[in-house]
Image: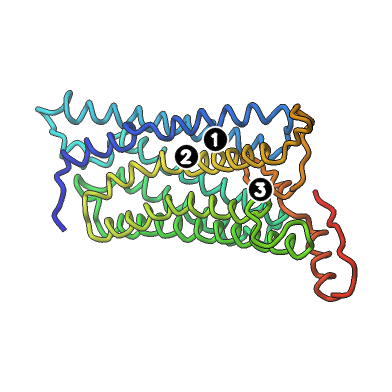
């Protein structure tokens, strides 16, 4: 694989992070949706996700500002004395340390948020999030050690064996942790969707009342981030400078993943809301929710929309006693 010059990589990496503006659009859309929803729901998870979304956007904005500063110093202010290549290879500069620290903080917040989402879905089960939480601690330790090493390694040693060991730990841990939590969330929703179908809440495979579309939204959004991690692991293992480009794109991607989930679920809920509006004699009438399992939290994508444990119990009873009359599950 042909190596990319650092001068080219530096420009492309900053452009990738700032030019598309996808994260900014999704962020303000999410803020609008959340503020509109707060008139109807002010529970803890919604507030936690909203505050974290604001903090993540602030971190990403600061990261972009520092990248612009580094670009100007490397290509304009210090071009004649240091040069772009030597500037970006100097890992111990304060702006590089700050830049990588913000990258790490953004990753930690994203990992913590998905663990919290998993915690909510599994009815506040601490056992379920024990391994993902331990992986998050490992990630924090590995990132901290790598940042410390940046201040000690000589110029141009980004692919030194010591750093490679810790960087592989960081990226590998992030991938495994996100794969675990996303799988646990998807499995939990699928299982409850199946239980609600058995209990008679909705028909199996129903396009309007099924929770399967929510599974698809969460998995697809998480796959975007995990795909980048795989590419980053491969490029770093091959000592390729293109890893700088993928690394810079991780910061907005983490924000995109969480805001995209909120926006897509909100759009789906809006369509279902219109579908369940009763309009007798051509006039508007109060809303009537015929399919409670489709009412979703636009921040968590989960929460009250999932079938309660009582529905699972009824499903079990229905399986064990086929001759019994169909029961209507008690929803949250």
- Mark 1 or mark 2: whose residue is earlier in sequence: 1
Q: CA distance from mark 1 to mark 3?
A: 17 Å
Q: Position of residue 138 (x, y in %)?
A: 49, 56
Q: On the image, numbered disc 2 is attached to which residue?
A: 255
- Mark 1 or mark 3: whose residue is earlier in sequence: 1
> For the point 32% across and 54% down, which residue is it?
232
In the image, which disc is placed on residue 302? 3
Q: Quadrant of residue 23?
A: top left
Q: Secondary structure at mark 1?
A: helix
Q: Position of residue 10 (x, y in %)?
A: 22, 38
Q: Position of residue 82 (x, y in %)?
A: 13, 32
Q: CA distance from mark 3 to mark 2?
A: 19 Å
In the image, which disc is placed on residue 53? 1
> For the point 17% across and 23% down, which residue is it?
77
Q: How many marks?
A: 3
Mark 2 neighbour class, 10 Å CA radius: few under 14, some 14 to 19, many 20 or more? many
Residue situated furthest front in the rendering: 281
């Amino acid at each position: 694989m042909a190596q990319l010059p650092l001068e080219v990589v530096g420009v492309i990496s900053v452009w990738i992070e700032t030019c598309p503006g996808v994260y900014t659009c999704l962020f303000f859309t999410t803020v609008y949706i959340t503020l509109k929803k707060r008139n109807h729901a002010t529970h803890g998870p919604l507030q936690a996700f909203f505050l974290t979304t604001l903090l993540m956007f602030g971190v990403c904005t600061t990261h972009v500002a520092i990248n612009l500063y580094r670009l100007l110093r490397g290509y304009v202010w210090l071009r004649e004395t240091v040069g772009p290549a030597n500037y970006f290879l100097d890992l111990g500069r304060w702006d590089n340390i700050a830049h990588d620290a913000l990258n790490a903080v953004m990753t930690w917040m994203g990992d913590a948020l998905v663990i919290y989402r998993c915690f909510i879905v599994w009815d506040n089960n601490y056992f379920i999030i024990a391994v993902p939480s331990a992986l998050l601690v490992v990630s924090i330790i590995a990132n901290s050690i790598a940042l410390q090493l940046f201040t000690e390694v000589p110029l141009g040693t980004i692919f030194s064996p010591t750093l490679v060991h810790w960087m592989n730990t960081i990226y590998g841990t992030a991938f495994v942790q996100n794969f675990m939590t996303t799988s646990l969330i998807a499995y939990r929703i699928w299982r409850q969707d199946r239980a609600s179908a058995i209990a008679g809440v909705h028909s199996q495979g129903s396009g309007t009342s099924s929770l399967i579309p929510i599974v698809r939204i969460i998995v697809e959004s998480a796959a975007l981030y995990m795909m980048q991690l795989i590419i980053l692991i491969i490029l770093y293992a091959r000592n390729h400078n293109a890893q700088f480009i993928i690394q810079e794109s991780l910061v907005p991607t983490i924000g995109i993943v969480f805001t995209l989930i909120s926006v897509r679920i909100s759009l789906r809920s809006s369509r279902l809301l219109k579908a369940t509006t009763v309009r007798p004699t051509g006039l508007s009438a109060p809303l009537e929710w015929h399919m409670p399992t489709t009412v979703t939290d636009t921040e968590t994508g989960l929460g009250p929309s999932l079938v309660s444990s009582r529905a699972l119990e009824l499903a079990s009873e229905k399986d064990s006693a086929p001759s019994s009359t169909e029961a209507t599950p008690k929803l949250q």
